[in-house]
Every structure is written in C-alpha cells, then in structure tokens.
Amino acid sequence: MGLFNFMTEDIAIDLGTANTLIIHNDKVVVDAPSIVAIDRNTNKVIAVGKEARSMHGKTHENIKTIRPLKDGVIADFNASEYMIREMIKSIPTLKNKLFAPSLRMVICIPSGITEVEKRAVKDSAQHAGAKEVKMILEPMAAAIGIGIDVQEPKGNMIIDIGGGTTEIAVIALGGIVADKSIKVAGDVFTNDISYYMRTQHNLYIGERTAERIKIVVGAATDELENPPDDFAVQGRDLLTGKPKQIVVTYKEIAKALDKSILRIEDAIMEALSMTPPELAADIYNTGIYMAGGGSMLRGLDKRISQKTELPVYIAEDPLRAVVRGTGIALKNMDKFNFLL
C-alpha cells in the first residue's frame, strides 16, 4: 500500500438533506445545496448544487429538480450517486491531478438509520469512486466538531437539527448512551411556513420563498430581545390567482413553527428521561450543545433552555460543526477508529 499512498486522497462528507459539505486537506472545499436538475427527455443530469437550486421551483415540463436525500437518507439512488460524483469532481485540488486518485471517504449518517439505508450510502459512495468508505454517526461527528472530548467518562448532550432529521444524543466514553432521532427539522419548518401562508393569508408560496422567510424572520418564540424587521413576501393569491405581496412578522412565524418545535422539545425530554443518572448529573453541569442549521432559528436555544431548565450552547458555525467533526475523525483515524 505504501507505494500508492500518495495516490489516495482522503475526503470527509456531510451528506445532508439540505446541503452537502466536503472537507479535503482540512478545508471545506464544497458547500452546496443537495439538489440535482434532470432533463426528463434524456434522463441526463444538467445541473448540481447551487445551479440546480436556482432552477428549483422554476422549471418547465422538460426539466425536473430532485432532492436525492429525504429525512437524512438516500431517496433517489442514481441522483445521489451522480451528485456525490459531481461534487467530488468540483474539488479544486483534485481537478488538476493527472490520474484520478483513489478516494478514502468518511461519511456521516443519522443515528436512526437502518442497515438498508447504510448500505445505500455506502453503495452510492463506491459508485462515485470511493475505494474505502467509513461512516460516522452525525451526533458523534457534531460532538467532535464542537470540540468535546468524546472519549472521556463524562456525559454530554448534543442536539443536531439538520434539514431532514433532528438527532438528539447523550455521549460518553466514545459511544452513544441514549439517542432519539426524529424527522422534524429544517424541511418541516419550511413546510409549516408554506402551510401557514396558505391558510392564514391565502398566499401560495414556493419552497425557496418559505426557506427565505425562515432565514430572515424565523423565530421559535414570540419574545425576542432584538427582533428582526418585518419581511415582505410575494406569492400567488389563492382567491384571485394574481401575484400579491404581504408583510409578515417574526411573531407570526413563531406561531407557524410552534407545533414542530414542541415535537423537538418532547424528543429532547424523552432522551433526557432515558439517560442514566450519573450522566444526567454531568449534563446538569455541562448543559446541552446544539449544532446544525436548524439551531440558528432565533430564540430556539432560549426555548429549549426554559423547557429543560439547563443551559444551552450553540456551536460556533453550527452549519459546519458536523462536517468539521467528520474531517477531524478522518484525519485522526487511528484515534477515532472505534467510532467509524
């Protein structure tokens, strides 16, 4: 193997429902939406990532846009394989190589994933050119990315709110002691906003607009210390069929998201109730750590803190905590081999 070591490239992938991130040589080299545009006539992929996202919701009948991952797992095998391959091809340092290097990959997966779904991730990666594929559980990767020493005999609670799933895990001694994975996360929040606009304002909006509302005025509670400005939303009036614009406040969005956030709170309480007493004592002292894009929802940390009566900390750069942890595990494979 020694002779060919220089031809092997290591990459860490966070294959997310909403975004896919790739780390190579300790740098995030790809950060793109997990979306693929396909020509219906030829079944050929015409765009991947940002370019495909700009088409999402605006296509004619010959083009369809697909999100290959649903609820954190692969829903469309061919599209996901193509997406992984194209994203790897776009890594600047691998573009200029004379020979295609053999790839060693570490991919993170949700903790509630089945054997069949694991197999699909592995097959996709192998078809996309990986010689060796290792997997790491998302909460574990998030914990490493946040900077927690996962091997010490101390309990830490991680909540990773992604696009498709919310992963809640209590970690100690390099293993997951109690975990809960629910399919309520960023995508469900987006759907809640669309539904609220339809039912309360008779305004039909697309997924991208709902996503934009979530980012600009999304909130988990209607009592924010520094609230965002009101946001003008354009869509189609369901009664007249004409385009129209309305203005929404963060309080309305907090109301729209309330039910889904309650489900996340319940899952957190359930995970806490499954935690052994010694670890519960540790969590009381250390608090709860949050990562993933969903944790950036305004006021969510405060709301969870009130519910659990524990301090809640959001990771710095929560969107990249998981891929950072995956990259660290890849770099120190000998140390973290037991996790992979």
Image (spheres, grey):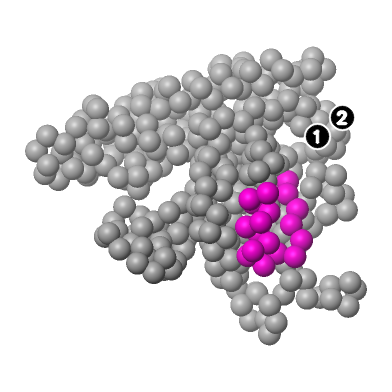
* Distance from Cα at disc 1 to Cα at disc 2: 10 Å
The x, y position of residue 175, in whole percent, is 80, 34
Residue 23 visible to an observer of this rendering: no
The tag on residue 153 is 2
Quarter of the view holding residue 189: top left
Q: Which residue type carries mark 2?
A: Pro
Magenta segment: does it hold 56? no
User: Front-most of 131 and 289?
Assistant: 131
The tag on residue 175 is 1
Q: Residues within 10 Å of mark 1 (few under 14, many from 20)?
A: some
Residue in the picture at 61% in, 36% down: 160
Magenta-tinted stretch: 119-136
- Give the left or right position of residue 44, taking residue 7 as reference: left
- Give the left or right position of residue 137, taking residue 18 as reference: right
Q: Residues within 10 Å of mark 2 (few under 14, many from 20)?
A: few
Q: What element carries label 2?
A: loop
Extreme-bottom residue of the structure: 98
Q: In this view, does 33 lie above or below 82?
A: above
The x, y position of residue 52, in whole percent, is 41, 61
Residue in the picture at 75% in, 53% down: 134
Q: What element carries label 1?
A: strand
Residue 81 visible to an observer of this rendering: yes
User: Front-most of 40 and 212?
Assistant: 40
Q: In this view, does 293 lie above or below 227?
A: below
